[in-house]
Amino acid sequence: MENFTILPSGNVLPKERLYERSQELVTLLLPNTILMFLLLIFGFTGNVIILYCYGYRIKKGKGQSNRDFITCLATYDLLACVLGSSFGIALNFHPLDFKHDVVCRLLWFATGTSVFGAWLILAVIAIHRYRMICRPLADQLTVSGRRKSAFMAALVGSIVAFPSLFLFGAHEFTIKGFDSKGYTCGKLVREDLKILQSFYDLVIGIVGFATFFVILILYCFVGRVIYLRVRMQRYNRKRVTTVLQERSSSTAEKDRLSAGSRAISTITLFDSKGDLTSLQSEMANNLKIKEKKNTPNRLRWKDFRFSFMFITISVMYIVSYLPRTYISIRERLDTDLWKSLTDQETVLYLFLYRMYIVNSVTNPIVYGVFDSRLRKEIRKVVCTR
């Protein structure tokens, strides 16, 4: 019996063949494992840099409320990268013999907390942007309010993820192509948990879709207000420019007389075609100065860069979770989904299922694109080392 593994189901599979099948799966999942390692390295590095720059390098000032939320998001992204990537690597190296039940349950809980917490923080940010842009005269979130919001998001995220400690764990499964059992880490397959698992999936779905619609509706209002403000400001600038031009043309004679002695000193400077170049350039400069003094401050799209940044992050977050949501729905409809997949399809589905980690890696890039102060500090850090 030393060359065989006796499985709980009573089936017997040669140890050598079980090991060979396990190595085949490890080799098959090697590209995914390499991807998980890269995501772990780049995600950890990028988010640590974000936390360091916003926590110690960038001084408090304008836009501090936005940077507080970025720090919170970077913390969740760091957890998602470390936990999600490490979890995926562990499963890839133990596709048939993951028996660490306690580790499995804790990883599901910690990963769920980071995911749900980040999701709720994005909703809080959407509410904050809506109040700042659409209700600027209303009470805004103070430093204490932002900290309480971050704490509540973490607390609610932990509460939502808490049932995973009992609904997920290491369990047996039938090895495809063999009449034998292996072990993996996932949703427990037990009759007494089916109702609870269905109810939990329903709660997750309701929370997820409700949060999605809140973010979508609020940013629609924010986008509309930003568009109307920029458009109105452009319209006002055109009107001011037109009035200044009319006023300058009607007072052209007065401008020439006020030039006085300066005109006398420059009137002899004609070019070969007889143009009064010096006087014309001087009058043009005077007109530009007057326009600059009388024209209101220009409202540009980049003045709303933090709003666009958070909108971009929210969209990327939603897109990165769509494949996981689709696969989860298919799992509910077809309990034998993973058994019916070919090896190549399994690799593809695992990549899509873990694609949310990519979002946590790319978020630091988004911060750098929209925040010029962050780019400046990163250059200082890189150049001084």
Image (cartoon, helix red, strand yellow):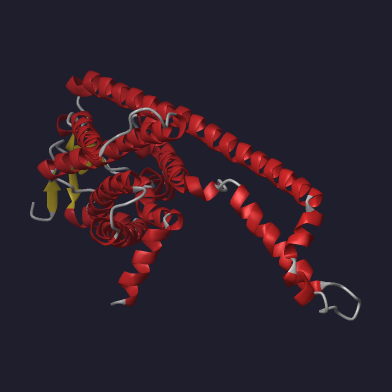
Query: Horizontal and vertical percent for residue 207?
Result: 33, 25
Residue 227 relative to residue 199: left or right:
right
Which residue is the extreme one toward the right? Answer: 273
Query: Horizontal and vertical percent for residue 89?
Result: 26, 55
Residue 18 relative to residue 299: left or right:
left
Query: Horizontal and vertical percent for residue 247?
Result: 75, 47
Q: Nearer the viewer, residue 45 or 294?
A: 294
Q: Look at the picture and state if 75 lies above or below 314.
A: below
Q: Look at the picture and state if 19 lies above or below 214.
A: below
Residue 119 relative to residue 262: left or right:
left
- Total residue callouts: 0
Residue 258 relative to residue 164: left or right:
right
Q: Look at the picture and state if 353 lies above or below 165.
A: below
Which residue is the extreme one toward the bottom? Answer: 272
Query: Horizontal and vertical percent for residue 291?
Result: 65, 53
Which residue is the extreme one toward the left? Answer: 2
Res 34 → quadrant: bottom left
Q: Nearer the viewer, residue 29 or 356?
A: 356
Res 288 → quadrant: bottom right
- The residue positioned 15% from the left and 30% from the top of the image is 166
Please identify the quadrant where the C terminus is shown: bottom left
Task: Note whether residue 63 is visible.
Answer: yes
- The residue positioned 19% from the left and 26% from the top of the image is 190
Q: Nearer the viewer, residue 166 or 22?
A: 166
Task: Note whether residue 180 is visible.
Answer: no
Res 209 → quadrant: top left
Q: Nearer the viewer, residue 137 or 205?
A: 137
- The residue positioned 69% from the left and 64% from the top of the image is 285
